[in-house]
Image (tube, helix red, strand yellow):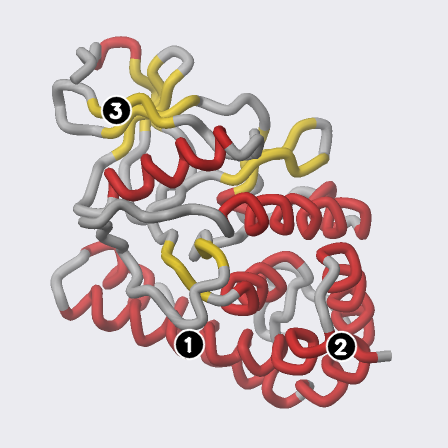
Amino acid sequence: MMASSHHDEESLAGGGVHHVVRSGRTVRRPVGPWSPTVHALLGHLREAGFTGAPRAHGFDDDGREILDHLPGEVAHYPLPDYVRTDASLEAVALLLRAYHDATAGFLPPPDAKWYQPPREPAEVVCHGDLAPYNTVYRDGVPVALIDFDTAHPGPRVWDLAYAAYRFVPLTGPDNRDFPLPVADQARRLRLFADAYGLDRAIREVLPHTAAERLERLVGHMHEQATAGVAAFARHIADGHDALYRADRAHIARHEEAFVAALLR
């Protein structure tokens, strides 16, 4: 255990579900049953040479996990202009590829617990919430990923589908976060896939998987709200689930155009 000192703590922006604070060069976050497994993953990433994630330093006297504070800017909504560039999108794809490749050799502890259930085939350890708000940028360039609470073993495409939804993005006309014509979405989706190095098999199912991923997200939100998690109940009250459903319908409606762009 490491001692904590609350007087020097600064609340960080974001933290849609958890209250996160900075203390000096560290971040303190609430823990769950999955936290020791996530710490083992972060240790593996460092040993594998992947530096785009924080190191874990155990837990403080208040039971919170202690992580590196990574200098830079986290991209919250409304998205800054640097997140919207093609160069930034391609850099995100390269960062995700490096992360996925680094996780491929990870052997979870025998008593491993995950926030999300593992999915087959377990090709990599999915981050589980790949989005600008979990990405650290420096000088407009994505350099690191944060918040690994939702990490879990699964296929690459499951993680990539949500990342494409968030970063391309594959959002419908009612979503004002980053509106783009379908043609531009298809073009940027191809850039993302090319930068990551996606094979044909994943390209063929990526848009459909993105729609499936949003359906699962809405289901998870309602499950958590029913279980009494106030943050998810608030998200539903604010209409987030309706927006995700509309975005899912948008992806399904234009799936053929997205697949055509990916395979061109």
Q: How many marks?
A: 3
Placement of 102 over or under 197, stated as above or below: above
**Residue drawn at the location 18% of the way across and 57% of the way down:** 229
Placement of 255 over or under 39, stated as above or below: below
Name the residue nearer the viewer: 47 or 97.
47
Quadrant the N terminus occupies: top left
Q: Disc 1 residue type?
A: Ala
* Residue sitting farthest toward the right: 264
Q: Is residue 50 left or right of residue 180?
A: left
Q: Which mark is residue 58?
A: 3
Residue 76 seen anywhere in this rendered image of the structure: no
**Residue drawn at the location 27% of the way across and 55% of the way down:** 115
Could you say which quadrant of the image residue 38 lies in? top left
Q: Is residue 39 left or right of residue 138?
A: left
**Residue drawn at the location 18% of the way across and 49% of the way down:** 111
Could you say which quadrant of the image residue 58 lies in? top left
For marks 3 and 1, give the CA distance: 38 Å
Q: Is label 3 in a helix, a strand or a loop?
A: strand
Label 1 vs 2, first from the N-terminus? 2
Q: Disc 2 residue type?
A: Val
Placement of 177 over or under 183, stated as above or below: above
Q: Nearer the viewer, mark 2 or mark 3?
A: 3
For marks 1 and 2, give the CA distance: 20 Å
**Residue drawn at the location 42% of the way across and 14% of the way down:** 25
Q: Residue 96 at x, y = what percent?
A: 61, 49
Q: Which mark is residue 242?
A: 1
Could you say which quadrant of the image residue 191 lies in? bottom right
Q: Which mark is residue 182?
A: 2
